[in-house]
Image (cartoon, rainbow, N blue to C red):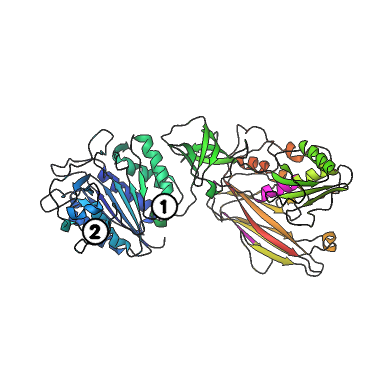
Amino acid sequence: MTGRVYGLLVGIDTYPAPVPSLSGCVNDVTRFADVLRDRVGADVVDLVVLRNVEATRTAVTTHLTEHLGRATAQDVALFYFSGHGSQQETPEDLWSLEPDHRNETLVCVDSRSPGSWDLADKELAGLLDGVTRSGCHTLVVLDCCHSGDGTRDADEVVRLAPPDPRPRPSSSFAGLDVADGRVRGVGRWTPAGRHVLLAACRSSEQAKEVTVGGRRHGALSAALDAALLDTDGRPTYRDVLRLVTADVTSRVTDQHPQVETADATELDRPFLGGAIAATPRPLTLSRLPEGWSIDSGAVHGVPEPIGDDTTELAVYPLTGETSGSPLATALVTKVLPDRSLVDLTPDLDAAYVYRAVVTAIPLAPLRVGVVGDAAGTAALRDAAGRADETLVDLVDLADGDSAPATDLLVQATPGGFVITRPGVTRPLVPVVEGEGREERTVLALERVARWLRLSALTNPSTRLAADSVRVDVDAGSGAVGSGGTLTITYAGSDAPRFAVRLANTTSTPLWAALLDLTETYGIFTDAFPAGSVALGVGESTSVELLGQVSDSMWAAGTVSLRDQLMVVTSTVEFDPRSLQQEELDVSAPPAGTTRSADASAAPRSNLERVLGGTRTRRLGPRPDVAAVADWRTDSVFVVTVRPR
């Protein structure tokens, strides 16, 4: 958002008789004004706050029109009401808009005085319709009862004003034009433009109050304040609904906040149209009616469980440190588009929202289609059965099958094995032949699997921004950043040089590792002597590297190679050197039967455990004591050209 937030906040506790007085409504709007200034910024928030006697019908409708009417297409218009809700008979010429012939209303401080009226839902919609015509984003928050049988107090203090029995003419409805049969703003509470309504409860439920910090507040208002203050991200309306629902339903019964809009895509917009500061948000866990779940799903990169292998999370207090033993462990059981269901051990208090940190990620095995000689196929399968089945999954295919679901193809011939990519006839590596060819073929497939798993590794729950460690790769002609590709060329027989610069742009110390994933399935982790390097606040480091196309490959016709330079950033120290593997070479016989991944040291953090998972799933149980890191991966690609 590049504009301002124009807000009208109305809180009424003290009503004249016969409307009963309330408690907590003025607290609601006073507190929310402070939250807006804290999370949005006092310099971009322009608020009018009407409390008690200030909140007359004329004052509310005037400020709705004039103050919120200042919002342009770049701005946000906010109307927040905390007070009595009620109902009212609908004039006969508006019956077509209200099947039950009753309007829901907001009760202003003078609504029941002679010559004044409640503010009906149709009126509010009509008034806001004029505001939204500028193209501004509009948010309506109603922490009141707008149903026929609600209360707004957990102690059964009725927060629903008695209905107004006076007949009301349609001409008294502000914002509606019914003279010629046209009616603008006919929605329930909200206009037809870009708007979102956050309501305290369903129309058949009670909107209640709770005590927070020794002060009374509406349950919705208290939950909304907490949602905006306790998350340091830029929450969407769906995120806010999730947080306030978990909070409200944990404190009171039979109250479910609602978000409504004419356009469902508005729900995926940031709360207040993006006015909340853009900082990474934590992955949260809460208990909803369907059970415990995290607020990330398939669209956020959470992978589906693979057999018994699934995403594992450590659970901590939402605003606490992620150090020491977690409160619980969560295992993802089902991945939905916007969230994932989990099993929790042990169970936790459903009254709270928690922070979740990924400690393990399921990584699919390499699917390899096998065709050709029956004896060779059987021998290859026997060798694979003695290997790490979590890395390679052999699929028998009939000759001629296209096998679109496989990652690689192996053709068994009397003389050896040919490894290719589906649809590509050129072998991936030279034909594997000679003694021990079955074991060497499986080892080659495992190396490819490890390379592919590492190259695609991401953290769906990271709070680190994309430029936490800024990556610049430069060969003297201009730097390329994360996601870019740098092309470098030999000068005669001289290999080209380039530099990689890593800079910590955050306000906290970080560790970074630079991994080189070569096109020939090598993984090199020796850019820094200890595997990773510490970067203090504002610190940077540089590494000079050489782009190479080996003489043997060049002589064989290869004139360019592509390297993936992966930068792994972490909030705790880590060592990636166990990932090291040489270029793929199938000519040498296997050296023993023990794989380096099986002999790796116990992981010291969740990141080291995830990195180890790219090499094998045989890591044993989760260690009782391990540091919890937030981490992310970013990659730059370097293409080295050696002309003929």
Q: How many labels does the image show?
A: 2
Camera-side residue of 309 and 480: 309
Disc 1 marks a residue whose amino acid type is Leu
| Residue 476, percent from left and from top | 68, 68
| Residue 234, percent from left and from top | 45, 52
The magenta region covers 446-472
Q: In this view, does 62 lie above or below 458?
A: below
Residue at 51% from the left image edge and 29% from the top image edge: 346
Q: Quadrant of residue 162?
A: top left
Camera-side residue of 545 and 310: 310
Quarter containing the C terminus? bottom right
Name the residue beneath numbered marker 2: 63
Q: In which quarter of the image is residue 247?
A: top left
Residue 264 within the segment the image draws in magenta: no
Q: Dot 2: what SS?
A: helix
Residue 267 bears which disc, if any?
1
